[in-house]
Amino acid sequence: MEPQKKLINSAESCVDDALLGLVRASGGLSLLKGHRVVLRYDLENLKGKVALLSGGGSGHEPAHAGYIGAGMLSAAVAGGVFASPPPGSILAAILSLHNAGASGVLLIVKNYTGDRLNFGLAAEQARNQGVAVDMVIVAEDCAFDQPSKAGRRGLCGTVFIHKLAGALAEEGCSLDQIVSKVTEILKRIGTLGVSLSPCSVPGCLPSFDLPPGDMEVGLGIHGEPGIKRSKVASADEVVKTMIDHMTNPSSQSHLPLKSGDCVVVCVNNLGALSCLEMAVVTRSAIICLESRGVVVARVMSGLFMTSLEMAGVSLTLMRADKETLRLIDAKTTAPAWPNLSNVCLSGRSYITEPQTTIKRPQDEKHSEGPLSPVMHKTLEKICSTLLEKQEELNSLDRASGDGDCGNTHAQAARAIQEWLQGHVVPGCPGKLLSVVAGLVQEKMGGSSGALYSLFLTAAAGHVTEGRSNAAAWATAMNAGTEAMRKYGGAAPGDRTMLDALCPAVDELIKLATAPSGGHMAVLQSAVKKAASGAEATRDLKARAGRASYISPNLVSLPDPGAVAVATILKAILEVLEGRK
């Protein structure tokens, strides 16, 4: 037996389970007892109006039951997966709508033999019972250059017909008026599908084999293969091929489309394309059509008429005049109809220019001050030390991460060295911290770049030219550490750089109360605390960062981030000790 690859209860119950799921999740729908028929809950609102009934095999969700609501379908009847619904259920649905007081019932049927026969039979039986019934057949597939006697298939263009006929019915048009208007519009709709995969009916094997790298062009929605197979190309090329095929005048089933025509586009996910791919294809379709001088008035992109889990897309184009757009824009409560804007998309300005340009601190002009030389010397020392430690940090990182901790610190060091060559060090320590934050954010990358940048940015506001005494630096260091903890989510003991930084900062806070002669002793003690904090990470289990995903038994070396912090603090101390 084939292992279960579908999230269902059983192949036998999946259609009924799915219908029940849809109805239970919506306040506007109900199920007709004894039938796979979904009805509008508020049938009394159909009194005196034309009711719309559609349906077909299951597996095309959200078609058709997702299109039930005011302004669209009144009911939908479902068959088994990819199987036409039985005439008895279609008749039961027609009679429910008739009994609710509908002035007539319009059946919207996709052009498949089974659907035509079963809906046709139910229509004849209903007429015999005095119901005003009519039927429109949707056959807008552009795949075949010379369609067989069965004619063109009904595909996702059917959803446009649900919408247009539904809007006309809501406005009170008669059955004959709706049929005549919809019949005209049908001539202006074309659809073509491509797929990168087959699909499989629950309990069955895939419908056809498709080697990796191939795609099926011109396929329907029942798992059947297409008219030709070709290699998967870029989205732009695939979409161009599709639109070329759909509008090729030498094909009997083409959609005439010329420059200046206005269209509504439906980019329909056949089931398993990602939303990302769908957005890429949608862009391709708009650009391709506009390059031909076609005006793209509306675009709907999403899941509208699927083929189970097929990884493919169909494009439906409908030439539209003002009246068609008015009907497309009319309100509907149907849950599967998208919330479209009623603005013409072609010709719309869609780029917003930023009102303010973000100034990078490292680009600003700064003036030197009394602290500039020592800060310059300290930065130089930090950079040279980190470059010396590059390989050591990398090898520590290989034990628990991706082995690039030394490289990322070296990148930051080189960026700072480069900046120092062409700029003066500002006299204001806060401005220098902002500059280094900007350089680190841009050049260091990874989460460590973000963490250092957070630390420096949060600290920068606490040290200015007029306020750069020991107490101010202690406050700044504390503010930076708190920012790291707040946004990074780690705490001391989690085997991160905070295990070196927090003990050092706890010590540095003593600068606020220490006599000026005792500052260096506090600094020396802080550097020792950082070093022992880094060393102690050997025995800690990582609870944050990438190392938290590694088995703790594999890691017996200190955390590279903590070692880097201890190294930086030691470099600062060495410069300041040398100034005594």
Image (tube, grey):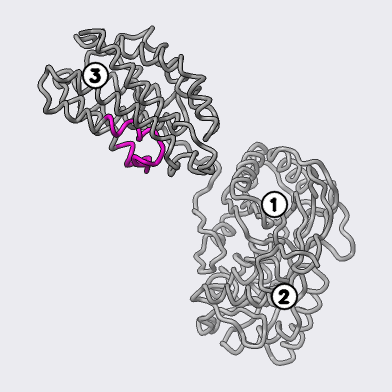
Residue pointed to by mark 2: 135
Question: Nearer the viewer's eye, disc 2 or disc 3?
Answer: 3
**How crowded is the residue under tag 3: few (<14 C-alpha within 10 Å), some, or many (20+)?**
many
Position in image of residue 72 (x %, y %): 57, 70
Specify the quadrant that holds the C terminus: top left
Residue pointed to by mark 3: 429
Residue 497 part of the magenta segment: yes
Q: Where are the magenta residues, as a range?
A: 483-504
Q: Is residue 154 above or below residue 263?
A: below
Which element carries disc 3, helix, strand or loop?
helix
Residue kind at label 2, given as amino acid type: Met
Hey, which quadrant is residue 378 in on the image? Answer: top left
Residue kind at label 1, given as amino acid type: Val
**Sequence-wise, which precedes: disc 2 or disc 3?**
2
Which element carries disc 1, helix, strand or loop?
strand
Position in image of residue 367 (x %, y %): 24, 10
Disc 3 from disc 1: Cα separation? 57 Å
